[in-house]
Image (cartoon, rainbow, N blue to C red):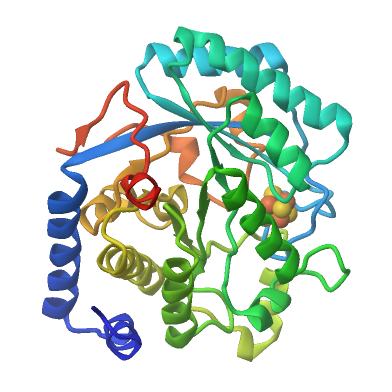
Amino acid sequence: MISRKEITELLLSKEPEIISNLYKRAADLKLQTIGPKVHLRGLIEISNICRKNCLYCGIRKANTLCERYTLTDEEIMTCAKHAYAAEFGSIVIQGGERTGRQFTERITSLVERIKFIGNGALGITLSLGEQSEEVYKEWFEAGAHRYLLRIETSDPDLFRKIHPNDGHHTYDRRIKALMDLKSIGYQAGSGVMIGLPWQNAEHLASDLLFLREMDFPMIGMGPYVPHDDTPLTVTTTTDPEASFPSVADRLELSLKMISLLRILVPDINIAASTALEALHPKGRIMAIHAGANIVMPNITPSDYRKYYNLYDRKAILLEDLDLGDAEIGFGEWGDSLHFFNKV
Ligand code: SF4
């Protein structure tokens, strides 16, 4: 087993041979444990309206420069049918965090309708932020079986620095939501941002050990990609202590994190995040070669994609499913082996 000290040393290493050996070790382990396939999740970004104000996020509520949109039910159904026809196997319904009965019931009814497509052929992942346990239960019973909710950082102090101190963005609330998802029976996915201001290798090593400790069956980790219209970007230009790694270093750190996580928990699903493509045109393929096995092609109608701008230069705008020589598990759910091994 790899120790915290070794993890930190590998994260800090600049030796090309050590780094390429790390990627190779993780890719070999993926092959032996879960096989060669990459599984797809068609990503439908249903709305960029959000009630939260995370300091790094381009679609935060207070960003008045962000033009808001919401897909209609029929547009969402068309995307889901497209995913089914293209044999994506699964979809992710992602949107800003909203609450209230009208929103909850709308999602419930959409999940139920999507389950009818191909007689339950599509696996459904939701990514709609922190909700009450009752709401999570309602959506699970409607047919969603995976939920993505990133912790962003496992360090409570760093979490506080990248979120407003208004009582609505707390570390404890996020942990409670993740525990609720797990106890309801979802395949609960989480993840962290890599290369944040104030973050160091020890934070990242702790993140990896936290993700293992929490026993999440699926993980999506991506590099921090600054967005111009956010308070965190303003802070990084005015506070020298809020510096963060270069594009090349954030890319390398992200790939190392994927490899290290694969070594720590070989049978989980690890996503090649879209944010990686914002740093390098081949970021997604690089992630697969470093041990990732899930790709989330964006299937939101192209008219709306430009408004879902969590990051600047989001690679989604250039979406083109180029996965090199990877073998794709068309029409398969590609659930996390770890989830079933555990159950
Ligand atoms: S990170 Fe998520 S919850 Fe936070 S402002 Fe952005 S969309 Fe909303």
Q: Position of residue 263 (x, y in %)?
A: 25, 67
Q: Is residue 268 left or right of residue 312?
A: left
| Position above or below: 137 against 25 | above
Is residue 97 something one can see in this rendering? Answer: no
Image point 48% across, 39% down: which residue?
A: 316
Residue 45 located left or right of residue 10: right
Rendering quarter of residue 153: bottom right
Comparing 184 with 74, the one in front is 184
Task: Identify whether 303 is placed above or below 187.
Answer: above
Please give the name of the residue rendered at 74% of the width and 28% of the height, measured from the top-left corner.
Answer: 70
Residue 89 quadrant:
top left
Q: Position of residue 215 (x, y in %)?
A: 45, 61
Residue 299 pos. (x, y %)? 49, 26
Q: Quadrant of the N terminus?
A: bottom left
Q: Is residue 293 visible?
A: yes
Q: Is residue 252 above or below residue 296?
A: below
Which residue is pictured at 42% across the width and 68% down the height? 212
Q: Position of residue 41 (x, y in %)?
A: 43, 33
